[in-house]
Amino acid sequence: MSETTLNRASRNSGHTRARSAAMVAGTGYISLFLLAIFANFMVKEGLIVPGNAAETAANITSHAGLFRWGMMAFLLIFLIDIFVAWGLFILFGTVHKDLSLLAAWFRIVYTVFLGVALVFYFQALQYLGMSSSYVNLPGTVREVHSLIALESFNSVWLIGLTAFGIHLVILGVLILKSRMAPRVLGIFLVTAGSAYMADTGAHVLLSNYHNYAGIMIIIVALPSVLAEGWFGGWLLLKGGRKQV
């Protein structure tokens, strides 16, 4: 077999591996999108009333099954993110291996923080009488501790989102460094990642963050939905194919 044939076979094998990795990451992204809508907006935002422990407790106890499914959705997000990090590392390793590894590490750090945050989510259930360890505590005490646990979930997740933002910025840079995907997609990913970091910074630095919460949600949500939705679709349809 000639050297040219061997090189061609090696390139084809590399393209096949990159395409498979893109499919894994793309499928994971679509799954994450659907699970996040359910877990975050339908369950967490739907049942938790900020600052109102009694109403939050009443919502959770009367919809305990839904709350548990929301927790399961977050658990699946935690696991799927590991496969997504692997797929993206393989795919973008063909552009710049060190930057691709760095992006993967930041996504793994975010994933670890989400896993830690889930401990508080589970603890909220335990405080509301789902565990015999707390059943003898006064109801108001259990309700307050449950809400504190849920707020701790938000805090830990928020810190993790800083690492996720850096991950998106690095992915955007990798796209801008290559012809692998449209440059506009790279710009959108950098913008979305910067918005995540800015939101966490605002939480930390602004004592009156609640006055700007509505604006910050828009600043984070718009570029995030556009960038990550487009990115997930690109991974499934074109990611890892031969460059033009």
Image: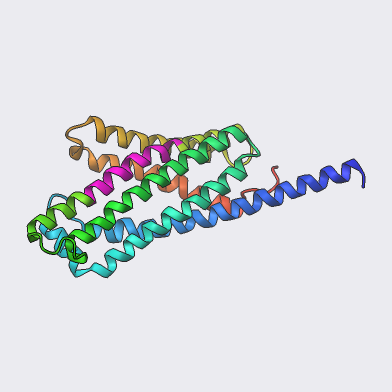
Question: Residue 132 placed where, x, y %?
Answer: 19, 65
Q: Nearer the viewer, residue 155 or 50?
A: 155
The colour style of the image is: rainbow
User: Is any part of residue 13 visible from this angle?
Assistant: yes
Quadrant in the rendering for residue 109: top left
Measured as percent of width and height from the top left, residue 67 is found at: 27, 64
Q: Residue at x 50, y 55 (%)?
A: 28
Residue stretch in magenta: 150-166
Q: Residue furthest front?
A: 133
Residue 173 located left or right of residue 166: right
Q: In the rendering, at what x and y percent does residue 152 appear?
A: 24, 46
Q: Is residue 63 above or below residue 137?
A: below
Dominant SS type (magenta): helix
In magenta stretch: residue 160: yes
Q: Is residue 128 magenta?
A: no
| Count of marks overlaid on the render | 0
